[in-house]
Amino acid sequence: MSECRAWSEGDPILEDYHDHEWCKVNHDDDFQFMMLCLEGASVGLSWQIIMHKKDAYRAAFHDFRIEACAAMTDEELEAQRSNPGIIRNKSKIYSVRKNAQAVQEIRKEFGSFDAYLWSFTGGEYDQPIDGHWKTPAQVPTVSGVSIAMSKDMKRRGISFVGPVITYSFLQSVGIVNDHLEDCEYR
């Protein structure tokens, strides 16, 4: 068995994520937005915690439909502060609406959130950045692309997008493929 799966072994939710979503190209704007928000919610926490709350997040935030999240009222957001199914940090909760509104502006400029995200790959649309790693120790936590994307997202008003979180986000939507060379889910 490849060491690639070591971080997910023994947790059915993480195993499913590793095997079927992680580093798999997904061009759906709402899915990409969901992963952006979930990665942001993970700041200071483990990915395992967030993945175990994913269904509650989807229910709390209109299945992460960008338009619906952008239109959430203060009352709706405040109500989520007492939702035990999600991380109840006020800044993280309010960032969903703020980020949705920023993504709406990005879509106006680029046509889609997907087109914006892939613009950071140097025109290699649908060609994931693949390091062909052989060991987990080789897999980076940041890259030139994650640094540039983080900087641009922050400039556009998106929250919780430091270079490390942005790198994880790139993995989560398949722009980066960090499955090890011997991983059967590559």
Image (spheres, grey):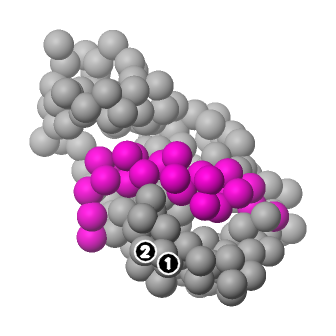
- For badge 2, the amino acid type reads Arg
Is disc 1 surrounded by few (<14), some (14 to 19) or many (20+) residues within 10 Å?
A: some
Spatial distance from mark 1 to mark 2, Cα to Cα? 5 Å
Is disc 2 surrounded by few (<14), some (14 to 19) or many (20+) residues within 10 Å?
A: some
Tell me the number on the disc at residue 81. Answer: 1
- State which region is magenta: 44-67
Where residue 141 sits, quadrant-wise, is: bottom left
- Mark 1 and mark 2 lie on one chain; the one further toward the N terminus is 1
Q: Is residue 66 in view from this perspective?
A: yes
Residue 131 in the figure: left or right of residue 27: left
Chief secondary structure of the magenta portion: helix
Residue 59 belongs to magenta span: yes
The structure residue drawn at horizontal position 27% and vertical position 70%, both measured from the top left corner, is 44
Q: Is residue 103 in view from this perspective?
A: no
Question: Are the residues tagged 1 and 2 within 8 Å (C-beta)?
Answer: yes
- For badge 1, the amino acid type reads Arg
Closer to the camera, 138 or 162?
Answer: 162
- The N terminus sits in image quarter: top left
Tell me the number on the disc at residue 88. Answer: 2
